[in-house]
Image: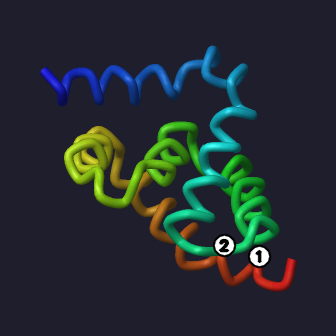
């Protein structure tokens, strides 16, 4: 049942209605970045801007999950395409370095 809820949530994240809540998603991403990756607000804000331009709403939501929320992150990862997972991987390898010094 929990997995179904996660899959439905991921589907909802991909809908245009989610775009209206973009500032909340961005704020959640920045907060998660600061608390889990220990980057500065400036770096996390830069990364949020890059994420909005490069990643899907579902990918941004995935990156905003608490690091120890294994059940939800696993379910979301399984619901994503391989392409989305690759984009997340590439983003996390490049964005922090691109945003350093900002």
Say few, some or many: other residues with alpha carbon within 10 Å of mark 2 (under 14 / 14 to 19 / 20 or more): some
Say few, some or many: other residues with alpha carbon within 10 Å of mark 1 (under 14 / 14 to 19 / 20 or more): some
Residue placed furthest toward the front: 35
The front one of 87 and 33 is: 33
Residue 99: mark: 1
Residue placed furthest toward the top: 17
Distance Cα–Cα, label 1 vs label 2: 6 Å
Q: Residue tagged by mark 2? A: 95
Residue 50: give x, y in percent of width and height: 73, 59
Q: Is residue 102 above or below residue 13?
A: below
SS type, badge 1: helix
Residue beneath the point at 41% across and 24% down:
11
Residue 42: mark: none
Residue 51: give x, y in percent of width and height: 66, 54
Is there CB contact under 8 Å for labels 1 and 2?
yes
Residue placed furthest toward the right: 102
Q: In this view, does 97 lie above or below 54?
A: below
Residue 80: give x, y in percent of width and height: 35, 43
SS type, badge 2: helix
Residue beneath the point at 72% across and 20% down:
20
Residue 91: give x, y in percent of width and height: 57, 67
Residue beneath the point at 23% across and 41% down:
75
Q: Is residue 97 above or below residue 25?
A: below
The C terminus lies in quadrant: bottom right
Residue beneath the point at 81% across and 68% down:
42
The N terminus lies in quadrant: top left
């Amino acid at each position: 049942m929990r997995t179904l809820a996660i899959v439905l949530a991921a589907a909802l994240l991909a809908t245009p209605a989610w775009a209206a809540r973009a500032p909340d998603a961005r704020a959640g991403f920045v907060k998660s970045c600061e608390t889990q990756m220990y980057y500065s607000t400036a770096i996390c804000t830069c990364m949020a801007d890059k994420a909005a331009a490069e990643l899907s709403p579902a990918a941004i939501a995935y990156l905003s999950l608490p690091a120890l929320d294994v059940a939800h992150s696993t379910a979301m990862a399984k619901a994503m395409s391989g392409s989305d997972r690759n984009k997340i991987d590439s983003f996390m390898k490049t964005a922090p370095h691109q945003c350093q010094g900002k």
